[in-house]
Image (cartoon, helix red, strand yellow):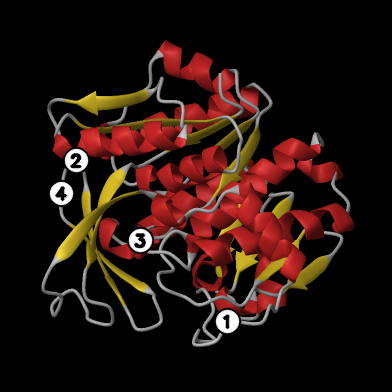
Amino acid sequence: MPDIICLGEALIDMVSTAHGLNLVQSPAFEKAAGGAPTNVAAGCAILGASAGLLAQVGRDSFGEYLRQTLFDVGVDLECFRLDPDYATQLAFVALSDQGVPEFAFHVKQSADQMLKLSDADLEYIAAGSIFHFGSITLINEPARTATLQALGHALDEGLLVSLDPNLRPPLWRSLDDAHEAIHEVIPQCDFLKVSEQEMAFLTGIEDLDQGIHALWELGPAVVAVTRGPLGCTICNGESVFDLPAFRVPVLDTTGCGDAFVAATLVQVLESGEDITDLSVEALQEIFRFANATAALTATAAGAIPGLPGREEVEELLELGERPELDEGETEEEPA
């Protein structure tokens, strides 16, 4: 059984072939495997960890493509299901000149939102060490009930619980619903990763130091706020510290946050310690590794195709946070 269990949406990113144009202007799109928990599971497997994905897609060509993509990178698919009654979600994505994605979701009642859990799924979770999820499967039933059931079982079995809300406003009936649903699960998590925008949304606080403390006070042992070209800020209650980003030539920032989470979970697992027992020095090493993994993901197109292996990450770590660029490369940084 896998050590790291991810639950959530698996979908197809239809990525614009024209860089710098919005969804209205984009002339054509190429498919890529996506979904934040899916990307995290793939990132963990590519980094060498044992990772599984509990998810549901349509029994269609896109679902088959997702299954094959995940199989190829080593994700355990024992609890990955293809449903004959619902279609795989499609997310159309256009990238700005800075590689920042704009999303539009196509399928109104997609297979991922119809997820239900079986006894075998609960046994699968219980055998793991880390449970990771997002907020997308909290939007609609029956996936909402399944997600909360899985979370409760993970807590009962003593797994480390990780949450990346991955807020996508167009999918929610209202932002008030999103705010309430995410706040319901934050206190049950050990590790919380948010962007600066998500921090402000969840706390109503723009100030980074106050906002990250407000999130930590909700219950997580460790909170990470990713800040694009400024790196990340970490709070474990006793200490707040910043880690700079690694400067790289940016092509596509899709999946950088997921790569950051995957790298964090792999490093915490390999530490052999409870996240609450990790020293500031240990956390700094973990999140330097996460920053490097996220940076490398931004240098390639697509989330899963851009996820780096351990050797690439270690090479970048040896160069340091501000390596010199090769001649002709631009000094851009991942968002």
Q: Earlier in the sequence, mark 3 or mark 2?
A: 2
Residue plotted at (76% across, 64% down):
318
- Regarding residue 216, the answer to whether it shows in the image is no
Residue 229 lies in what quarter of the image?
A: bottom right
Mark 4: amino acid = Val
> Eyeballing the image, is 39 above or below 197?
above
Q: Earlier in the sequence, mark 4 or mark 2?
A: 2
User: 10 Å neighbourhood of mark 3: few (<14), some, or many (≥20)?
Assistant: some
Label 3, label 2: how far apart the Cα atoms are:
21 Å
- Reading the image, the residue beneath label 3 is 168
Label 4, label 1: how far apart the Cα atoms are:
42 Å
- Asked whether disc 4 touches disc 1, contact meaning CB atoms under 8 Å apart, the reply is no
Label 2, label 1: how far apart the Cα atoms are:
38 Å
User: 10 Å neighbourhood of mark 2: few (<14), some, or many (≥20)?
Assistant: many
Label 3, label 1: how far apart the Cα atoms are:
36 Å
Q: Nearer the viewer, residue 126 or 323?
A: 323
Q: Earlier in the sequence, mark 2 or mark 1?
A: 2
Mark 2: amino acid = Phe
Helix or strand or loop: what does disc 4 sit on?
loop
Q: Nearer the viewer, residue 74 or 311?
A: 311
Mark 1: amino acid = Asp
Q: Earlier in the sequence, mark 3 or mark 1?
A: 3
- Asked whether disc 4 touches disc 2, contact meaning CB atoms under 8 Å apart, the reply is no
Residue plotted at (43% across, 34% down):
147
Q: Residue furthest front?
A: 327
Q: Nearer the viewer, mark 4 or mark 2?
A: 2
- Reading the image, the residue beneath label 1 is 326
Q: Nearer the viewer, mark 3 or mark 2?
A: 2
Q: Position of residue 18 (x, y in %)?
A: 22, 76
- Reading the image, the residue beneath label 4 is 107
- Asked whether disc 3 touches disc 4, contact meaning CB atoms under 8 Å apart, the reply is no
